[in-house]
Amino acid sequence: MSFFKDTYDVIVVGAGHAGCEAAAAAANMGSNTLLVTMNLQTIAQMSCNPAMGGIAKGQIVREIDALGGYSGIVSDKTAIQFKMLNKSKGPAMWSPRVQSDRMRFAEEWRLMLENTPNLDFYQEMVNGLLTDGNRITGVRTSLGIEVFGKTVVLTNGTFLNGLIHIGEKQFGGGRAGERAATGITEQLVDLGFDSGRMKTGTPPRVDGRSLDFSKMIIQPGDEDPQKFSYSSSTKPLQHQRACHMSYTSPQVHDLLREGFDRSPMFNGRIQSTGPRYCPSIEDKINRFADKDRHQLFAEPEGWDTCEYYINGFSTSLPEDVQAKALRSVAGFENVKFFRPGYAIEYDYFPPTQLKHTLETKLVDGLFFAGQINGTTGYEEAGSQGLMAGINASLKAKDKDPFILKRNEAYIGVLIDDLITKGTEEPYRMFTSRAEYRTLLRQDNADIRLTPKSYEIGLAKEDRLRAMEKKKEQAEGLIHFFKETSLAPEEANPILEQKGSSVMKQSDKMFKIFSRPQITLDEMVNFTEVKKYIDDHALGQEVLEQAEIRVKYAGYIEKEKANADKLNRLEHIRIPDDFDYSKLKSLSYEAKEKLTKIRPTTISQASRVSGVSPSDISVMLVYMGR
């Protein structure tokens, strides 16, 4: 007698950031869900740096939270430092980031999953998929156990045929101290999938007791820290741990170069592509030979541990070279290693083989999420897992799919980029990838996404009501600014002080507040504004939301108008069996790319690499537009 259900709605393979979000989402939507992983002790392991968020990534975590995912809550509960990055720039660039307690992060994730109804767990390697024709029916484990499911979500991370490199040494593994996963790649290739290899790397972990922080530059958290989650269940940090910064030097670079002939990156043993925007230290000194120093950050791994992560020193050089070079960095003269840095190669599947739901085109009911799709980063993985879990749950119940557009979320940009353009190097999200980044700010993710999530049964009602209250209060304050006037004698002293031109007659507060020199801090000096804020007990989130919408009203309206124009093309569907070869005027490259990727709308077709505006015009004419 089996200890599994006869048939699960959703089976999730892998319990990294993608797998955890997928399992939580599916289970919270009422689907009977099974999470299978090789080791239950490493659920939600932070394999690389102990941090969540950052440029564009912080927006993704906010979006995951707004949709009802767990990453924001777990990050808040286990944070040891909070920073809002890019505050000197416009709000479209503001990005929250936390340093996390690595052990507590994984523990909190596991406890939250164990308290999620409809979710079962099983520890074993999945080394095969069960199919009936082109439809998924379940998975097979290394013990030969068959578990049946209506849908399967693969979130294998770096484990598929993972190979670890440290100098001349190489050995199979999906992460330091853990074995690789085998069997799935070979079966997927037999089913007709294209696969490839990618690599990523991680720095050494060192003993903080052996570091001299007096020689480094302290990097404290924000004086008034915020938090990731919109939920009232988490609170901002009261105390924080500092990071510390040091620099490499020409001497350090010379010592590293001595080991290049033993580096798997330079002697040809690693053929696969690594992350362009998070290069190894040897790659940095090779590519940027004109720079005589690079920043290194010593980041604590938790509240109580003495283990430190050396951000900026990712490497696969031999361990003796790593030690010799790092000991030449100021503050690291007596450093003791917990473990050396290493590179890891692993299998991935080009994501052009997926639909917008992250379901594969070849096998019905099979979904891919995370690094298997060629991405890098916990946040990118978590967001894909969330969307795959949502769509697997909806598919199991024969409901319409849930898809986010490019003007609705960074998650929409991420998925559209992957399935439309593909990726030949580990994909990382940046604000520059989003053409509507003024709309997709971190402060309004709940307003953008919580109503959509509530409609599909994931976000709970208390989240929706809190969002509605915030939105109502922000709009009320903006209306107050638009309707209330200020006299010159009241406004001019502050305007003069801030170097802004004085008023000759009364004017609306909205217009005054719109001036670049005037911030909310100045506006609060006006009696009526302070009284309104106090009378309505407006919190910081509401004030920030209102200020951004006043200051950037013109930009926001312009982006909305552009988005509306492009969305018209989103509504022009391309039939599934559309024959591009019939279009004589279509370029050869367009025919080839469109036949391979099979976009579902004219808008998506316009974003395929190699498809020109004239190709789109040909299609519109042919389709009778």
Image: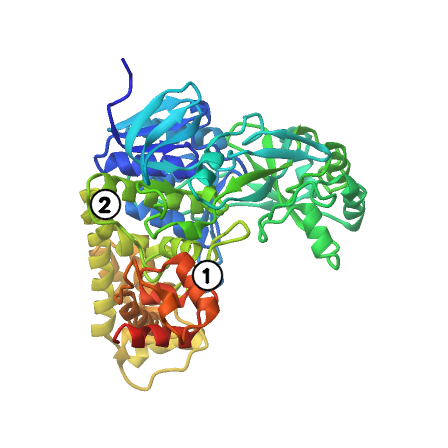
Q: Which image quadrant for residue 191? A: top left
Q: Nearer the viewer, residue 229 or 376?
A: 376
Q: Is residue 123 left or right of residue 230?
A: right
Image spot of residue 377 (x, y percent)? 49, 45
For residue 551, what is the image quadrant? bottom left
Q: In screen coordinates, is 117 left or right of 169?
A: left
The spot of residue 199 in percent (x, y) is: 58, 43
Quick check: 214 left or right of 240?
A: right
Per the image, the residue denoted by label 1 is 433
Which-is-in-front pick, marks 1 and 2?
1
The residue identified by callout 2 is 463
> Crowdedness of circle 1 by 10 Å Cα count: few (<14), some, many (20+)?
some
Q: Secondary structure at mark 1?
A: helix
Sequence order check: which comes first, mark 1 or mark 2? 1
Q: Amino acid at mark 1?
A: Arg
Per the image, label 2 sits on a secondary structure element best described as: helix
> Residue 96 or 128: which is nearer the viewer?
128
Image disc number at residue 534: none
- The amino acid sitting under disc 2 is Arg
Q: Residues within 10 Å of mark 2 (few under 14, many from 20)?
A: many
Residue 420 appears in the figure: yes
Q: Toward the viewer: 86 or 449?
A: 449
